[in-house]
Image (spheres, rainbow, N blue to C red):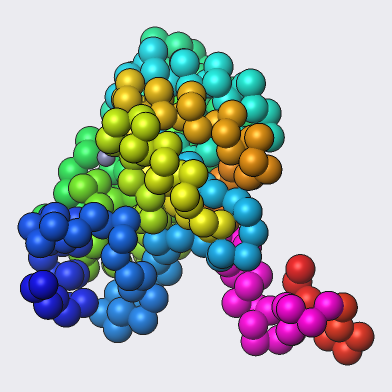
């Protein structure tokens, strides 16, 4: 197999490079210690809990968004994260006023995916900052209020210097994924059924991924899985970091230390 360094991975753009050598991005080893990428970056959360984060990118299709909203309402404990492009924030709001506010009010999360699905890797940091602010303006407009944005899913899953700068400047965490949707529902659902705690599932608002969700949700519920927002998954991860330094997480109640969880 072709050997690639992490530097090459960053330079060439992760997913495209992995695809070129026949590896699914979801199988790639995390980049936790990448010296050139200094902002927080996750491929999955802590493995400690039976929780997954489902994420839905792009959000191009109104009818599939509406169908997913109905599905989510049937599973009120399940919370997911959307990564809409800015142009669709505005477009879907126009077609179905209040759609984004309903989702946020129901506990779902929204993250940044650029205003018009551009590859941040070919943008300058200054242009990317302007793009983020334009996208955030659209989000604030459709919600009628500020929404705490913590995550970015870079379009085309490209990891770049500009992404790093943007994350640092706007306090964002890059969220890639450990299970990819986008295939035939039976294949995707099987991958989910074989998933581990902390997995981040990448879906898109498309018919195929909606159909996968329709099959996966009841199975996850019946098998005592929690679907949580990326914020929840990330906070679990941060708590685990605190615990691994300050508290023995596997030895029961500590009498001398205060554990976060
Ligand atoms: Zn996308």
| Horizontal and vertical percent position of residue 27 | 31, 60
From this view, report whether residue 72 is shown above or below residue 171. Answer: above
Residue at horizontal 37 percent and vertical 32 percent from the top: 186
Which quarter of the figure has residue 247?
A: bottom right
Residue at horizontal 51 percent and vertical 47 percent from the top: 53
| Horizontal and vertical percent position of residue 44 | 46, 60
| Horizontal and vertical percent position of residue 14 | 19, 61
Residue at horizontal 39 percent and vertical 13 percent from the top: 63
Number of marks in the image? 0
**Is 244 a magenta residue?**
yes
Pick whichever, 21 or 62, lies toward us: 21
Pick whichever, 158 or 22, lies toward us: 22
Whether residue 129 is visible, yes or no, is: no
* Extreme residue in the top direction: 95
Residue at horizontal 10 percent and vertical 62 percent from the top: 21
From this view, report whether residue 56 is shown above or below residue 210. Answer: below
**Quadrant of ligand 1 in image:** top left
In the image, which residues are magenta? 234-252
Rendered-image quadrant of the N terminus: bottom left
Q: Which SS does the magenta portion mostly show? A: helix
Relative to 113, 105 lies left or right? right
From this view, report whether residue 247 is shown above or below residue 54. Answer: below
């Amino acid at each position: 197999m072709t050997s690639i360094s992490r530097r090459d991975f960053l330079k060439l753009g992760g997913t495209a490079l992995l695809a070129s050598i026949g590896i699914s991005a979801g199988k790639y080893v995390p980049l936790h210690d990448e010296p050139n990428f200094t902002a927080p970056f996750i491929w999955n959360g802590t493995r400690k809990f039976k929780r997954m984060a489902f994420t839905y990118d792009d959000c191009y299709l109104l009818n599939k968004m509406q169908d997913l909203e109905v599905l989510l309402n049937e599973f009120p404990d399940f919370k997911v994260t959307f990564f809409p492009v800015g142009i669709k924030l505005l477009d879907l709001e126009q077609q179905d006023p209040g759609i984004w506010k309903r989702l946020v009010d129901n506990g779902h999360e929204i993250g940044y995916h650029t205003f018009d699905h551009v590859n941040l890797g070919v943008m300058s940091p200054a242009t990317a900052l302007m793009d983020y602010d334009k996208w955030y303006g659209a989000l604030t407009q459709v919600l009628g209020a500020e929404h705490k944005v913590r995550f970015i899913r870079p379009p085309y899953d490209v990891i770049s210097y500009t992404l790093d700068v943007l994350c640092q400047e706007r306090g964002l965490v890059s969220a890639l994924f450990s299970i990819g949707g986008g295939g035939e529902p039976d294949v995707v659902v099987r991958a989910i059924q074989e998933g581990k705690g902390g997995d981040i599932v990448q879906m898109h608002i498309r018919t195929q991924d909606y159909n996968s969700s329709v099959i996966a949700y009841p199975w996850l519920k019946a098998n005592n899985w929690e679907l949580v927002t990326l914020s929840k998954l990330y906070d679990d991860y941060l708590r685990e970091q605190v615990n691994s330094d300050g508290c023995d997480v596997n030895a029961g109640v500590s009498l001398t230390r205060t554990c976060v969880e």
